[in-house]
Image: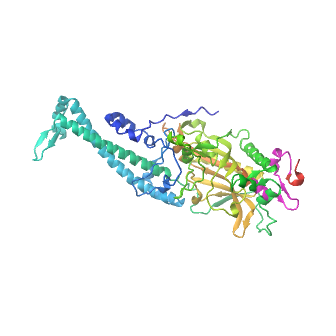
Amino acid sequence: MIKAMIKAPRAPFVCLQCLQCRLVRPQRRQRLLRGSTTARLFSSSTLRYKSSTNPASINPGSDDIPILSRPPTAPKANIDIKHIRQNPALYEQTCLERNYKTQSAYPSRIIDLFAQWQTRQRDGRSMRERGNALRRQIANPTTIQHEDDETESGSGKTKPTATTTGGDVKTLSREQLIEEARTIKDKLSSIEEDEARLEAQMTELALAIPNLTSPETPRGDEPRVLSYINEQPEQVLPSSDRLWRSHVHIGSELGLLDFTGAATTSGWGWYYLIDEGAQLEQALISYALAVVTKQGSGWHQVAPPSIVYGHIAAACGFQPRDQNGEQQIYTLAQSTADAERGKPELCLAGTAEIPLAGMKADTLLEETDLPIKYIGVSRCYRAEAGARGVDTKGLYRVHEFTKVEMFAWTPPDADATAEVFDEMLDLQTEILQGLGLSCRVLEMPSTDLGASATRKCDIEAFFPSRRGPDRDGWGEVTSASICTDYQARRLATRLRGAAGAGGKLTYPWTVNGTALAVPRVLAALLENGWDETEMTVDIPECLRPWMDGREKIGWKHRRT
């Protein structure tokens, strides 16, 4: 049984505006500044996906780098900026291989900012040393005078002095020492503000850099075929539109789909499932859950929320990559009162991966509990910005759909993670094999990877309606990704007891995979199971227990 998760202790939150007032207590301030970097980088305003605050809009050569602010209650991200500084060419190459061209300049920019930060650190250290000496002399002039006499010959230090215009040296008075202390305090305030600004800029640039790419991933834009599922489709083109009808025509003719009514109600990209269409959706969900959660599998079923905080979605890697700031997720409008109170912005989850990952945000896991494997059924919402065409018509690309999603936390070990990843691929294969669909398993190329994935495998099913002179008929129905510690670091999901960590806290790795995306699989079943002569669709045997035992869908088989 999974042990109760222990909430990780929060680092103290430090408001940038409070640095000035804290200068009167330098020792306390220094302790705070040695805490988590990101604990003092974010204000109480909410994270918004707009081009004005999108990391892709940052000018790498500008000192004015906008901050993607997060509420103080958000998990405190801990990005390994040191690794980026030590391997700038690796991160630059990764960005270019994934078409993150703007972000490819961020590693060198981080190095420049770090050099500026080091300069501020040296200046601040010198100021603090002088300020401490002044405070000691102001508090106890006799003691500091005795200390100066003892150290004068050994260290070369001299008594507090000032040089006059004529070149004579004189001892500073108490009033002059106090004035110099005030001046140092003001300078130190400015230095510390610069330090915090530079740290914030480095963190924001680092947050925008995608994960490193796995050696297993093909570079470029061509996937590598790993294997096939079931028999492959005949390599012939359709002789007529009627021979290979699309699921849009089949579903409409059998009264299973209604796109016209949905267009009136909600717009393009929404749909109604009717009668056996709606029943088939529930059958697919039940079938996928039965396959994954069979006895001894270790998968725990979860019913996750469909609305999440925007900063949680961003931490999972769901943010625009282009400079136009096009959104793939829907954000919920805030009232003026909520915005003024700094209430975090909410968005509709594009996949159950987001709320499942967020379950362990700001949580300390035990290595003995890993892997933790969850499977969740949820409604998913996607803006799906981009071009429309014959390949995206009907159910293939929609704004709202039901999906069964697998998600797991694994030890930070490549072999242990690969074992869970392969398990997900095996489950996906078992599900699609049982449905009788012709599929191919692909190792996806670097240009197809999102921000969080280091490796991704897709499974494509054959759609007769997608075949044409310049189209091969394949379409994605599932995907599985390894994200290493990309999401865990951004969600502050920490791990205790990891092998090789030397007792220190580290970060688990995350893996996600689609068990079944209903609309596309439903569309593939309609097209591949269509009988033109009988005007019916065959129901796969594995789904019949949830379809009242029926073998076919058609008007003459419909029960009233």
Residue 426 visible in the current orientation: no
Q: Is 523 within the magenta?
A: yes
347 is higher (above) or lower (below) than 234: above
Residue at x 68%, y 46% (from the top left corner): 379
- Name the spot of residue 229 as percent of width and height, x first: 73, 56
Of 250 and 232, which appears nearest the observer?
250
- Name the spot of residue 416 as percent of width and height, x first: 60, 45
Residue at x 27%, y 43% (from the top left corner): 126
396 is higher (above) or lower (below) than 376: below
For this view, does 503 lie left or right of residue 524? left
Residue at x 58%, y 41% (from the top left corner): 358
The colouring scheme, among rainbow, by chain, secondary structure or one colour, is rainbow
Residue at x 86%, y 51% (from the top left corner): 551
- Name the spot of residue 481 as percent of width and height, x first: 61, 51
For this view, does 291 lie left or right of residue 53? right
Specify start and end residues of the magenta stretch as a single range.
522-551
